[in-house]
Amino acid sequence: MSIGSLFARHALYRPGQTAVVFGDLRLTYLQFNRGINRIANALLALGVNKGDKIATLLPNCLELLEVYWASAKIGAVVVPLSTLLQPKALVSLLNDADAVMLVTNSGWADAVESIKPDLPNLAHDRFLLTGGQRKGFRDYQGLKAAASDREPDGEPVGDDDPFNIIYSSGATGRPKGIIHTHRVRAAYATTFASAFRITPESVSLYAGSIVFNKAFVGLMPVVFTGSAYILMSDFDPALYLETIARERATHVILVPSQIAALLDLPDFSHEELSSLEMILTLGAPLDRAHKDRLNRLLPGRFHELYGLAEGFVTVLDKHDYPRKPTSVGAPPPFFEMKIADPNGIELPAGKIGEICGRGPILMPGYYKQPELTRAAIRDGWLRSGDLGYVDEDGFLYLVDRVKDIILSGGVKVYPRDIEEVVV
């Protein structure tokens, strides 16, 4: 079953429930589902078929969410691309993904126009522009307005059909398209809804870019439970705190640099954040001083997640933090973890080795790269490339990251990418 079917379900049984808030837009599940259906039907009318790759080059916006879930309903595969990409890298990823359509906005139209000759898979009428009209681009809003808001009548979508391809360069900087199926994303939904205690009454706030895999850690439980999702265009610390207080947000996901920025605000007031039930940090280690201050000001809310987009995570629960403050937690239910030596043999507690894991969110593989898939997943275990150890209670502690990368705001930046920009 398609994860897109969740929206039809919520539109039927909880039509008036707030689905998404973005800026001045506030849509119920009934309204949001109708918009998703319009885009899905417009894509079908343009000849997009099940399995076709639809790339996006968009900042946080309602249209990006619509493309995600419209693609899910018709079995298309969404390929979200970062707006930080240089044109050369953009061409490489679009061609590697076999994208047949690109959805962007006016801010990137000139860049896209300049690379059109290098994109043989994209026909001239397969470039959609979400804001305004321009020669060489189809009008996204016009297509949406002209399409039916009924449930799309496409090919059946199954659990093992791919939903998206997320690009991650990994240790070498070579692009790798991580495939996530509908089954994998459904497991994201149930795993993290349980781990973070997200219910239909929850209100989740997110201010990071939703093109990165970490966004789905919070997005999928919201879609599953039919709760409210507040999306900010970008992260502004003062506005972020105001939004929490105004919307009575219950669940937030932040990278360490965002937490530091919030705590450094001169008018930071933890009393205004009393609605929060979860503060999750992920993407990079959070230093102990910030952890301790956060837990002193807002006790009983802090969670930490360690994980790989390829499909393994550990979660430090808010109730485990007081006794395991330097740990990154334990595997959720149905996940397994081991610390292995170079031969893949499990090491005892206290011994440092490579972190390996498996579970229901494990990717089926990298897109068109079977050799890299076999190198990453051996005997069913995902090899993380990260070093760590477990204590006598089975909790994981990170020691070092083998990968030669720089973490900036929770986003992986590779030295060779910096060199290309500088040169």
Image (tube, helix red, strand yellow):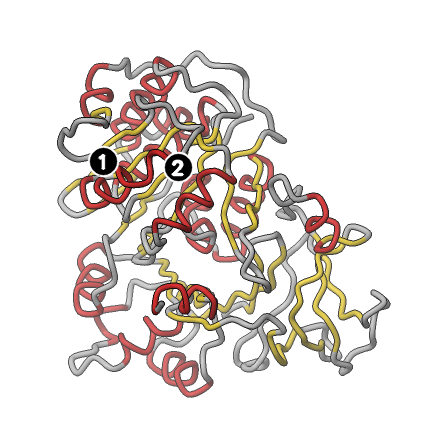
Which quadrant of the view contains residue 124?
Answer: top left
Q: Quadrant of the N terminus?
A: top right
Q: For the point 13% across and 44% down, which residue is it?
A: 24
Dot 2 crowding, Cα within 10 Å, few <14, some 14–19, many 20+: few
Q: For the point 60% across and 60% down, which residue is it?
A: 313
- Between the C-alphas of marks 2 and 1, the distance is 38 Å
Question: Amino acid under label 2?
Answer: Asp
Is the residue 238 above or below the residue 246 in the image?
Answer: below
- Residue matched to label 1: 27
Is the residue 358 above or below the residue 365 in the image?
Answer: below
Between discs 2 and 1, the one toward the N terminus = 1
Q: Nearer the viewer, mark 2 or mark 1?
A: 2
Measuring from the top left, give residue 154's x and y in whole percent.
46, 14
Which quadrant of the view contains residue 114?
Answer: top left
- Is 225 placed left or right of 347 in the picture? left
Measuring from the top left, give residue 298's x and y in whole percent.
35, 76
In depth, the one of 335 and 129 nearer the eye is 129
In depth, the one of 45 and 321 nearer the eye is 45
Figure label count: 2
- Residue matched to label 2: 118
Q: Quadrant of the C terminus?
A: bottom left
Is the residue 58 above or below the residue 342 in the image?
Answer: above
Dot 1 crowding, Cα within 10 Å, few <14, some 14–19, many 20+: some
- The local secondary structure at tag 1 comes to strand
In depth, the one of 15 and 210 nearer the eye is 210
Question: Amino acid under label 1?
Answer: Leu
Q: For the point 31% across and 39% down, which residue is it?
A: 64
